[in-house]
Image (cartoon, rainbow, N blue to C red):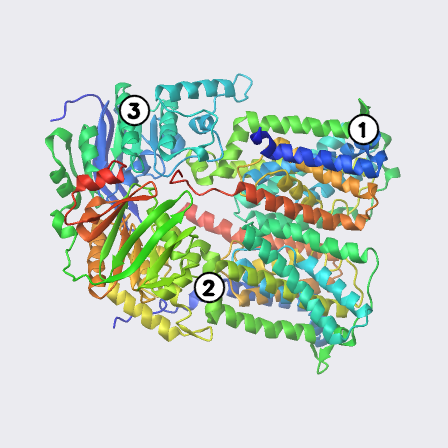
Amino acid sequence: MVVCLQMKLELKNISKNFHGVKALQNVDFQLQENSIHALLGENGAGKSTLVKILCGVYQPDSGIINLNNKQQSIPDPSASLSLGISAIHQESVMFDELSVTENVFIGNHITKSNGLVDWGLMQDKTNQLLKDLEANIEPNEKIKDLSIAQRHIVQISRSLIHDADIVIMDEPTASLSQKEINELYTIIRNLKKQNKSIIFISHKLDEVIEVCDEFTVLRDGELIKSDSIQNTNKDQLITYMAGREVNQIFPKNNVTIENEIFEVRNLFKKTQFKDINFNLRKKEILGFYGLVGSGRTEIMKSIFGITKLDEGEILFKDQKILIRKPSDAIDQGIVYLSEERQQLGMTGLMSVKDNINMAVMDRNSNFYVMNKLKEIKNSSAMQEKLNIKVSYWSQLTQSLSGGNQQKTVIAKWLSTKPEVLILDEPTKGIDVRSKSAVHEFMGELVEEGMSIMMISSELPEILGMCDRVVVMYKGLIKDILNVKEASSEQIVKLASGES
Amino acid sequence: MKKILLNRDFILFSIILIILIAVGFANPLFVTPKSISDVLTDTSILIILALSQMIVILIRAIDLSVASNLALSGMLISLLSTVHPELPVYYFIALSCVIGTILGVLNGISIAILKVPFIVTTLGTLSIYRGLIYFVSDGKQVYSNEFSEDFLALIHVKFLSLSFLFWLAVLVFIVIYILLNHTRFGRNLYSLGGNPDAAKYIGVNENKYIIMAYSLSGFFAGLCGYLWVARYSVASTQIAIGFELTVISACVVGGISVMGGVGTVLGCVLGALLIGLIRNALPAVDISQFWQLAISGAIILLAIIINTKTEQRKEKTIMVEN
Amino acid sequence: MSLIPDKPPFKLLDILYKKEFILFVVLVSILIINSNISPYFLDLYNLIDSTFLFSEKAIIALTMTFVIIARQIDLSVASIIAVSSVVLGYTTSLGYDTWLVLLLTLLSGTLCGAFNGAIITKFAIPSIIVTIGTMSLFRGLAYSFLEDSYYNKFPKLVGKLGGGYLYGYIPYAFLTFILLAFVFAFILHKTSIGKKIYSIGNNPDAAQYTGIAVDKYTFVLFTLNGLFSAIAAIFLSGRLSSVRPNIAFGWELEIITMVVLGGVYIYGGSGSILGVVISIFILGMLSFGLGLLNVPGVGIIIFTGLLLILSIGFPSFVRTLRRKNE
């Protein structure tokens, strides 16, 4: 039973549709005053839609929003701010070229009586705030020179300046070291003491249980459960979120791992990574775990030829190979599925057929002339294999659902008949059902003879899918562990920089 | 110390000094007070236009129509002055500004409301406005003897041995400096250019700012319409042809980034001064005017390349080297 | 094997919405209006001769189409014409053989284009800014070389190409344009090269990650633009038989207008050669018709500018209204 303090925010029966996709269906949500309330759910569960409604970016199709027991509407972001709602995102509402002071006061500059900006006052206030938060930041530093943890602090300062009563934090500890995380927890508890209410979004359940007072779980756009944290435990939360037993999400495949097929030695790139040595065996799934920003993507980009390596060797099937650009890697049979599906993986305004065939255009053409038959033959084969839901080949890729878009990108790479597949956060932002489909599919691929290197920030995914895991921290490999023999605690500790 | 030396504005300033000294050696007459005053006067219009173009470039756009705008506004008030020479000169200045602003607002509406991309819009208005000059003037010029004394005299009024035109440029500099650095409007321009999605999120109305930026650009183009006509004592269909390129070059040399959100008012002025200095220095060292265009082009390219090299977004540092 | 159709079922009405169809209707309207206005319009010889005015620009519009689809822009083409024309005149005055004169002319344009391409790709600078710079640089070089003089002696072949007719009927310049249009249409719509250009224009980063050599393609496109500017310069010099450094002044705007009016999106990724060709004829017939009405060249310029803005603004305005009503 929740001790009934004042109800700060109440959402009743909120629904939101996007082109027929039900993002939220009749969701109720109650935020008590002075409470740290966890908002939980898999990617695609509706959390970000809910947050965007609170921030005035979307309007609900139906339902009521009550703030301090008064009905409100939030037509746009400035309305949200003036109602005392402030949000801290992973990606930023940050302006790299402007100073800390300006970012704190952005959109809200203090003006003197003559209408001009009062830099002095803003600088003082910012200084005071930074001192209160015990941050080691100068007010006139440019945002582009700050670390991710420092940027979070700037965002928090901005919420405080706005005198926000409700602070929404979206994955606030995603890229922080353990020390920085603890500092953030202290700040959050201080906010609570200052009478703020906090909506805390995180997929790290241990963190949620430690920090939060209450929780709400969403799944597939619906409210599953709301209660006080003390009435639940981690396993229960997982069940609420996934809707089924954990083991079912990660189909374990029984594959005999063969000999080494791919190896890197002494990879080094200035300010990015150093002393990178690992190997990949045929039919193996090798995981790469670490905090966001630990260098995993940078290594893969260098292997794939997007960026240059300063030093190091790459060996494929025991032969040293030189990869200077992506087409070199692709020709060898090594492909890379980027984390940023929309920006780097697919070309939204081109057809599904074109996207599927994009990496094999040369193979599909005779003396540059496109062979439509080959294009369609390949597209059909891929569509069947991956079960891509599409009505016409000429359909624009951006019209597909997130899961089907990802499948299209995977199809693009499979068309090249690769031997090594590098997947960067392959299930990020996809609903649970598609997620497990992707995992099942990965299992099929290794059975067929492919080898996979997978970057993931979700420990359950690593533990469930991988044979070995490379744990990274700040550009270095902390250790390479056999998943069967390693414990979650061990892995998390290594990834946070502790030994 | 290193920070000062590498400061872009300081480098620009040094280059200007170096050129002055170099040219001064070759032609001592160039560095006399009168000569320098002439150079400053000559560059004043460029400074004013560069500063107003900066406002547009800050929000990731360009205004290619400024020269045509200037010429059309100038022609319209010139024609009016031949019919009504008795009107005070301030009337013409105000009218020119109003016409320029209207032409600028049309740009803004086309871009913000009709959603015609800025390149297409300003390329279009560049032609339309220039064409209208022929239309209103029947292709004829307005000669110096057709202007009233008052009309032409204002430019040449001197204060502290520097012309009114120069002091006007100083005034514009101060106004735009305050606008961009000390008003919400100015700071929001920087945010809109630096991160458009984020700026919209915090409530900056992009359409409003586009229209305002182009209106301001038009306003100053109109102002310069009067200034140009009064200074050169002629209004014709050919005035300021191609000048928009010079204006944009001044901004680029001055460090205003085409990617938006970056650039200082001081840098802009220094960029304009540098370009203006070179334009005047070439004849002083006996380099034929025909080389002007090529040299300007070369300088722009050099400036852009240097700009880019220093501006290059550094990759995020993940690993601190030991 | 699952049978997924390539396109949704064909509806005749869909054609009505296609840009190319609308452009075609506009063209036909202009032809009808023009023929009603002036009896000289439908005269075959007049029509043929009218093609001289736009053929050179049209040739460049073809490569410019590729450049714009690839999300770039080239404002220096008119200046490259100036450089190439000067080289043409100069090498002629040196008494070189015709083939050498032509070779050097083409080379000069190609080098200018390659210069553009190199700076854009090596320093990753937006093409609008680079070509604003080279626009001045190239024409400036023409001015510094020729000053206020002119060339009026060119190889006989050049004169023939510029002002002559094949079989007495078909102007060489126009014929070249039409033939090249077919070639470019084929490349853009039927080859992997064309698809890669669309891909680069739609999402250059994704294209790079897919293994497409974005920089290489960009460099080649600008170089080609330079080459075609030189080709146009040969026809133009031959037709004008007099070349000054201000030759083709303002042509870059007209060429870009041809491309954008033809339905090619200025920010890249979409457009067709057919649309551009129809738009070239629209602009050509418009100039011709207005010329017959004794509308001064200026009027045509104003009209073209308005047409350009409205051709994009009007449909977009209608779309916004429709969305507000939903």
Distance, label 2 to label 1, CA atoms, is 59 Å
Question: Which percent across, then down, holds residue C284?
Answer: 66, 65
Q: Say if labels 2 and 1 share a chain.
A: no
Q: Say if labels 1 and 3 share a chain.
A: no
Q: Chain of mark 1?
A: B
Amino acid residing under circle 2: Lys
Q: Residues within 10 Å of mark 1 (few under 14, many from 20)?
A: some
Front residue of this view, candidates B26 and A167: B26
**Rendered image: mark on residue A187:** 3
Amino acid residing under circle 3: Ile
Q: Say if labels 3 and 2 share a chain.
A: no
Question: Which percent across, then down, holds residue A375?
Answer: 37, 71
In this rendering, the answer to whether A110 lies above or below C48 is above
Question: Which percent across, then down, holds residue B227?
Answer: 76, 35
Who's the residue at 29% across and 22% down the image? A191
| Foreground label between 2 and 1 | 2
Q: Using the rendered image of the protein, determine whether residue A387 is visible from the camera's viewpoint.
A: no
Residue indicated by mark 2: C196
Who's the residue at 23% across and 23% down the image? A33
Distance, label 1 to label 3, CA atoms, is 63 Å
**Rendered image: mark on residue B154:** 1
Q: Using the rendered image of the protein, determine whether residue B274 is visible from the camera's viewpoint.
A: yes
**Rendered image: mark on residue A393:** none
| Foreground label between 3 and 2 | 3
Who's the residue at 27% across and 37% down the image? A496
Left or right for C74, reference A226: right
Left or right for A284, reference B246: left
Is mark 2 in CB contact (under 8 Å) with mark 1? Answer: no
Q: Chain of mark 3?
A: A
Left or right for A406, reference C44: left
